[in-house]
Amino acid sequence: MARLRVAVLISGRGSNLQALIDAAADPAYPAEIVLVLSNAPAAAGLQRAAEAGIATAIVDHRGHATRHDFEAALNQVLDAHRVGLVCLAGFMRLLTARFSAHRQDRLINIHPSLLPKFKGLDTHARVLAAGEAKTGCTIHFVRPDMDSGPIIAQAEVEVRADDTEDSLAARVLAAEHGLYPRVLRALAEHRVHIDGDRVTVDGVI
Ligand code: GRF
């Protein structure tokens, strides 16, 4: 069966991208990363893609007068690569309702908290300040509001008494690297169903 054609959108380091690249290196994996797109020309993840022989593109938001122009440029590149699913992985630009509606249920994001808790930035510092006993990461379909949208899967991580922001971030990031390839596999195997805002999964993620 044809592999799902996936674009990964990044702005920086690209460690989640790397986890997806590594998973998709197996020819039996049901998804193929056909494009890595960054809004930031210096994103380290672009190098990871190039090393894996994956097409890259830079759509610099600073070169576009409006969000609409920026997103039109994103769509042009995504369409040119006949992308079936877009994975956000540390993509640091907010997308408009128009963009997310156009790719409704074909656009997912990873966030380093157990949503709906701790949307936004600096999640680990806020988790520590709140005295949470556990945190984790979430992969969800993107909807217009930031870090909202139907949840596909979460992975939990314990918060330890001696955790710092860095130690907690590292533990959550390791969970992200485990979860993202599993979720992408489930999507590519058509085991994730969404009806309105309700997600059901056949089998395990
Ligand atoms: C991850 O923590 C992800 O959850 C968040 O941004 C970070 C990206 O890290 N959205 P990387 O670029 O994948 O290393």
Image (cartoon, rainbow, N blue to C red):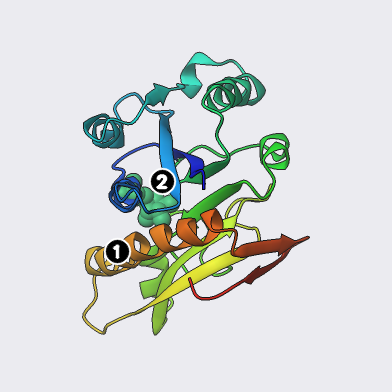
The x, y position of residue 17, in whole percent, is: 34, 46
Disc on res. 106: none
Count every numbered label the image shows and give the total.
2
Q: Say which residue label 2 marks.
A: 90
Is residue 57 among the parts visible in the rendering? yes
Which residue is outermost to the right?
A: 196
The x, y position of residue 13, in whole percent, is: 28, 42
Disc 2 residue type (three-letter): Gly
Depth check, front residue: 182 or 28: 28
The x, y position of residue 54, in whole percent, is: 33, 31
In the displayed structure, 109 sits above or below 118; it is above
The x, y position of residue 121, in whole percent, is: 45, 54
Q: Say which residue label 1 marks.
A: 169
Q: Is residue 82 left or right of residue 68?
A: left
CB within 8 Å, label 2 to label 1? no
Q: Is residue 153 left or right of residue 169?
A: right
Q: Is residue 82 left or right of residue 184?
A: right
Label 2 to label 1: alpha-carbon separation: 14 Å
Tell me if the residue at label 2 has its CB under 8 Å from ligand 1. Answer: yes
Q: Is residue 33 left or right of residue 144?
A: left
Which residue is outermost to the front?
A: 1
The residue lying at 29 percent from left, 27 percent from top is: 42
Between tags 2 and 1, which lies in front?
Answer: 2
The residue lying at 34 percent from left, 23 percent from top is: 41
Tell me which corner region of the image, top left, top right, bottom left or bottom right, holds residue 177. Answer: bottom left
Tell me if the residue at label 1 has its CB under 8 Å from ligand 1. Answer: yes
Disc 1 residue type (three-letter): Ala
- Mark 1 lies on a secondary structure that is helix
- Mark 2 lies on a secondary structure that is loop
In the displayed structure, 189 sits above or below 60; it is below
